[in-house]
Image: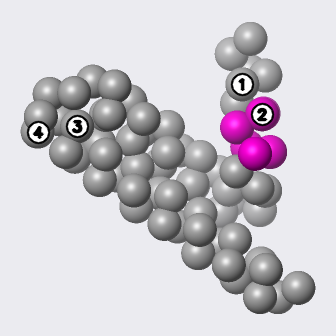
């Protein structure tokens, strides 16, 4: 069980890093969609770490807030 927790935390950190990269390079190529996806990925990654939830749980919660 500890391994699953560590793997999930690593995936959340990776998702956050990918989000930051999308933001950085989205701006460079002036691609607003890539930049917005990067922001979303970063937020989801941070929330996963803080709330100790899965990506699916976080995305469902965020979706429910904007509907």
The image's mark for residue 28 is 4
Q: Residue at x 39, y 41 (%)?
A: 38
| Element marked by disc 4 | helix
Q: Would you call the spot at circle 2 few (<14 residues within 10 Å), some (14-19), or many (20 or more)?
A: few
Q: Is residue 63 above or below residue 25?
A: above
The C terminus lies in quadrant: top right
Q: Are marks 1 and 2 in contact (CB under 8 Å)?
A: yes
Q: Is residue 60 magenta?
A: yes
The CA span between labels 1 and 3 is 23 Å
Residue 60 disc label: 2
- Label 2 with label 3: CB-CB less than 8 Å: no
Which residue extends farthest left? 28
Q: Which of the two discs, 2 and 3, labels the residue nearer the N terminus? A: 3
Q: Which of the marked residues, 1 or 4, is nearer the chain's N terminus?
A: 4
* Residue at the (57%, 54%) spot, across then down: 45
Q: Which residues are magenta?
A: 56-61
Of callouts 4 and 2, which one flags the residue occurring earlier in the amino acid sequence?
Answer: 4
Question: Which residue is the site of mark 3?
Answer: 26
- SS type, badge 2: helix
Q: Quadrant of the N terminus?
A: bottom right
Tag 1 residue? 63
Which residue is drawn at the image coordinates 47% and 48% (left, top)?
42
């Amino acid at each position: 069980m500890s391994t699953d927790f560590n793997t999930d935390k690593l995936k959340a950190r990776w998702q956050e890093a990918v989000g930051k990269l999308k933001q950085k390079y989205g701006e460079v190529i002036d691609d607003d969609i890539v930049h917005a996806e990067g922001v979303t990925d970063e937020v989801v990654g941070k929330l996963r770490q803080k709330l100790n939830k899965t990506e699916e749980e976080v995305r469902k919660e965020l979706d429910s807030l904007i509907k």
